[in-house]
Amino acid sequence: MSPAILSTLVLGVALALFASGRVRHDLVALLALASCLLLGLVAPADAFSGFADHSVVVIVAVLIIGRAIELSGVADAVTDRLAALKAPFPLQLGVILIIGATLSAFMNNIAALAITMPAVVGVCRAHNLPPSAGLMPMAFATILGGMTTLIGTPANLILSSVREDQLGAPFAFFQMTPVAGAVAIAGVAYICLVGWRLAPRRDSGEAASKDAYAVFELGPISQEEMNADAEAALIEALKNAKVAALAVLRGSRVLDLATARPLQARDRLLLGGAVDPWEAAKKLNLSLHAQRSSAEDAATIVVVVGNGSPLVGRPVDTVRWDTNGEVVVIAGGRRAAEVRQPMQRLRVEAGDQLTMHGSAEQIAIYARYARLLEVARRASAQINLPRALTALGIYVAAVVASVSVGMPTAFSFGAAAALIAALGFLPPKEIYSSVDWSIIVLIGAMIPVGESFQSSGAALIFAGELAQLLGGAPLFWAAAAMVTATMLLSIFLNNVATAIIMGQIAVSVAQAIGVSPDALLIAVLIGASSDFLTPIGHQNNLLVMGPGGYRFMDYGRVGAPLALLVIFVAAKMIELGFAG
């Protein structure tokens, strides 16, 4: 078999595994790299060259700097102030969306969503609207903002690396901003004027701590309640309290209610329902597994666990340990109903809903540390202003050094991250936990795989077929086709993998049809960051799905017009900027 066919087969299998979601994306990338090594498509000396790529260094550095700024609380304070202003809902929402988009241009867009999400919920409630009116718009705005600068999203850095490999120089810091900025402005304007009106008005109960779908433990059942009449009364009380008995916890065993009857002394009940756990405990005359806080500002708040949270993979009781008992998790969400485990055995996963109880201020502080997206209104936390301004100043200096002085981004941002770490702005463990290492492995492994797709001639073959389909089409239609193809592929793949594959094809197509490679690389850049049609296309879409009570098809209803607008504006701006 020719190298081109072998490379296409490896990439095709990798794409299928990526799309299936059954295998971790970083493992898929390592398997693809190993296959390329065994087939001779990648030389052994180049196997780990992707990890030395400057884009990897920049991504790590930006995540560390952005985390320090996120923990400073400055952005939280700004969004809190704006949420408190009196103005019409579209205007108030629009201001917060602009802030979210701006933040995501310079920091991780999940962090930007975490900062702005509580403000959006507060604004919605202030106007008697369910959070679903604003959460999807906020997710889309943070995605749009990420495409506007070199460091806005890892996909942009990957395409910059492809440009350097193919054309001899990477993208400048703001080189994509004229096109991507126009797309982001048009997209946010659409969301503010039309998009939020198309979002479903559905308060699923996921968005308010008092009626969120909660999975919690009650008990133990006393010996006095073990007669037949008391058991029947308890079963009836469960119905009246509008909770479902998910399991009976008997020692280390997890039993169905039917199997466990008759109930025994010391049994605990694992219950689920869109209820307040405290109220359910009162109605059933049973004890919740946690005690009420004695803090003056005690509150019960629903959060969603963000990607990269240090809680992922750890027991829910980690929250109690981390906060010396000041904050406890009293309930899980819908995933806890599926796994049916005692709360003490439940391990946290990204996207989980947790109901937390304790001091509202302590919850606010801990949520920033643990990357928890608070759905309920948070209390303002104390801000160390000198430290926050210093961290912002270091970040701005790194941007200025890259843009004005021409310093390599890997050096300027790497130095900024090292300085922030040296000044102690992040705890040592937090420096490492702020980086999503699975993405780093994905990028480092896939860069040589993508280069083998180019060097084997496979990219040129695909580009030739695509060039034939485009024929003598004007630049507008070529750019629109590239944005559309990338956008559709990104529905099924991580946008980093999409950028690696489509970036190689874009350069070959541009050379085949005689247009600027930058024109089609920017088209790919826009398409890779335009995941508006499904909840699985982007992590931000998935994170708001539960709190907003959204269904799969809701995303297409709001996102399809936005996707068409993005394709049109991107193609038109590329035509204006690169024609002739």
Image (cartoon, grey):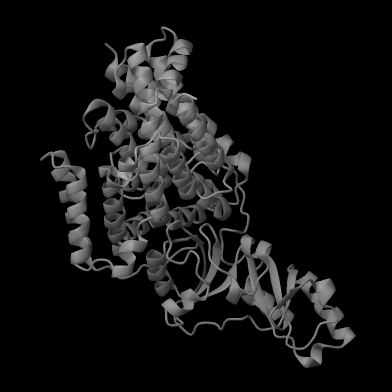
On the image, which quarter does residue 111 sit in? bottom left
Report whether 260 appears left or right of 527: right
Residue appearing at x 39%, y 44% in the figure = 445
Residue 70 percent coordinates (x, y) = 32, 59
Report whether 136 appears left or right of 216: left
Residue appearing at x 26%, y 47% in the figure = 58
Residue 189 percent coordinates (x, y) = 41, 34
Of 28 and 507, nearer the camera is 28
Q: Above or below — where is 459 with respect to 243?
A: above
Asked whether the viewer can see residue 187, the reply is no
For the view shown, which residue lies furthest in the right direction?
228
**Number of numbered discs visible in the structure rendering:** 0
Of 254 and 186, nearer the camera is 254
On the image, which quarter does residue 425 sit in? bottom left
Report whether 453 appears left or right of 160: right
Residue 124 percent coordinates (x, y) = 50, 52
Q: Above or below — where is 94 with respect to 163?
A: below
Asked whether the viewer can see residue 253, the reply is yes
